Amino acid sequence: MSEKLRWGILGTARIVRKTIPALQETKNGEVVGIASRTEEKAREYADKHGIPQAFGSYAALLASPDIDAVYIPLPNALHLEWILKSLDAGKHVLCEKPLAMSVAECREIARKADETGLKVLEGFMYRFHPRFEKLQELLGANVVGKLTFIHVAHSFDAGGDDNIRWYTGLGGGALFDTGGYCVNISRMVTAQEPVQVAAFGNYRDANDGGQIDTSIAGMLRFPDGATALFDTGVNLERRNFLEVTGTEGRLYLDNPYGLLEEDSVLEEHHFGQDTIYHKVRGENHFVRMGEHFADSILNGTPLRYDLADAANNTKVLEALDSAARKQERLPGE
């Protein structure tokens, strides 16, 4: 393997407008190829981003000996297929969240990763930003006392009917998209796995049949008694915040998932006292995630987040989806 990790991009989804420049900016990686379903589309993106090689199929990229690892930004329901094919082709995998659509799929990926000795990382990029290192430092110092409530929101408007989020066959809907962040951040803040869930959803007809969730309100209950409340949607005004409340105070972070090059501020509040503002330097979390992944491969160091973590996140999402679709009502009079 070369001194830098050689990346291939498996698809031309909208997110690559952020991730390709970020991977090109990493100190220990370089983007050497991109694939699309047509060579024309791949060449368009390759020329736009200065990528040397364009491939007219995903399989052609995976067959290239010039690529060590792939980044997968494909629709959710395609993750399992192309993660497995990538591993079979000898490529390490960084995949957009959610890693897969079920715990069973996550376990299948883990078995293949163990079999091949290759590394797979679920791409929750926000976890690599310094503001979350600061958040965990403050929680570790017990500044809020006993953790009691977490409130987190993540929503935006996905737009027209042609959006992939309105197709059940592509793994669309709010919960496995924006809701995955809310669950993931709640688990990270508590450093625990929930023992109970509750959820209520709003639904619309999917473009390919069935009902698909447009927004979800959910709750998670953790072993030590802390409760996380979240709301999320892909047909709503953009909202994006995290509030962590304990017996001694609370922490508030605006735009926890946003790609912020500017400095951000973590607020610390204590019962009417002057607010403490913790300023955190701006940094591209996609770059930091890419560098961490490349370092793990090049130097043989452990990944910060393993596939068991991805399976645990998916387990909660599956439970929330089941709870929301039951739509239980109070008994009538």
Image: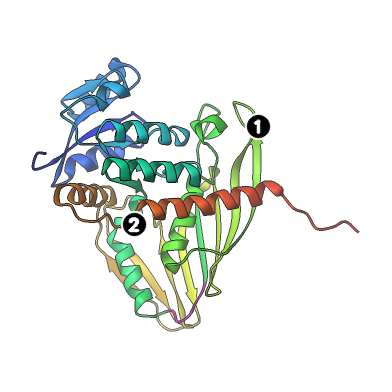
Q: Is residue 52 above or below residue 258?
A: above
Q: Position of residue 263 (x, y in %)?
A: 27, 60
Q: Quadrant of the C terminus?
A: bottom right
Span highlighted in magenta in the image? 144-148
Count of residue discs: 2
Looking at numbered disc 2 in the image, what kind of residue is underneath it?
Arg
In percent of the image, x 41 and y 64: which residue is there? 253
Looking at numbered disc 1 in the image, what kind of residue is underneath it?
Gly
In percent of the image, x 24 and y 20: which residue is there? 43
* Coloration of the structure image: rainbow
Q: Position of residue 174 (x, y in %)?
A: 54, 44
Q: Secondary structure at mark 1?
A: loop
Specify the label residue 210 is tagged with.
1
Q: Position of residue 326 (x, y in %)?
A: 71, 48
Specify the label residue 127 is tagged with.
2
Q: Quadrant of the N terminus?
A: top left
Q: Secondary structure at mark 2?
A: helix
Tell me if mark 2 has few (under 14), some (14-19) or many (20+) residues whose alpha carbon lies within 10 angstroms of its own.
many
